[in-house]
Amino acid sequence: MKRVHVARHAPEAHVVKGFLESNGIAAVVRGDHLQGGWGELPVDLCSVWVTDDAQFERADALLVSFLRGDHAREFRDQNWRCPKCGENLEGQFTECWSCGARRPLKP
Ligand SMILES: [Zn+2]
């Protein structure tokens, strides 16, 4: 069992859990049952765990793109091409992940 995500609050943890399960990855939420009445809780107490270690890397990769989803949609129409190496990049990147060149300013 491996922790794949630390949530800011219980609803976020359950959204993440549901997302993973919709992708066929069994997940559990830990810590949310402690909320209420305990005062200040450590921020990492509500977390999502993948029960099958073999699926952890896939879960982690899916989650990264999932959590980035809103951000990526926002920049959907701003894809750009690296002037140095020609790589196609998504709008949320400010520099080329391939060669490190900075995104050119729009004219
Ligand atoms: Zn480049």
Image: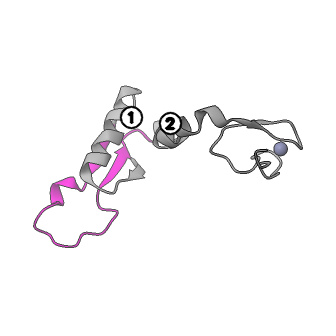
Mark yes or no: residue 66 visible: yes
Q: Relative to residue 26, is residue 94 depicted above or below?
A: below
Q: Is residue 8 above or below residue 18?
A: below
Which residue does the numbered mark 2 point to in the structure image? Answer: 62
Region of the chain picked out in magenta, as a range: 27-54
In magenta stretch: residue 31: yes
Q: What is the basis of the colouring in this image?
A: one colour
Locate the C terminus by quadrant. top right
Amino acid type, label 1: Leu
Q: Is residue 15 magenta?
A: no
First along the sequence among labels 1 and 2: 1
Residue, far right? 84
Residue at figure coordinates x 25%, y 47% from the top left: 11
Is 101 or 54 nearer to us in this picture?
A: 101
Quarter-wise, where is residue 80 in the image?
Answer: top right
Q: Where residue 26 sits: x, y (%)?
A: 35, 34
Q: Which residue is rendered at x = 47% and y = 40% of the image? A: 70
Q: Quadrant of ligand 1?
A: top right
Q: Nearer the viewer, residue 33 or 93?
A: 93
Q: Is residue 84 left or right of residue 25?
A: right
Q: Residue furthest front?
A: 107
Q: CA distance from mark 1 to mark 2?
A: 8 Å
**In the image: residue 61, left or right of residue 106:** left
Q: Are marks 1 and 2 in contact (CB under 8 Å)?
A: yes
Identity of the residue drawn at 25% across and 51% down? 10
Say if residue 61 shows up in the picture.
Answer: no
Name the residue carrying label 1: 20
Residue at image x 31%, y 47%? Answer: 12
Neighbour tally class for label 1: few under 14, some 14-19, many 20 plus, Cα within 10 Å: many
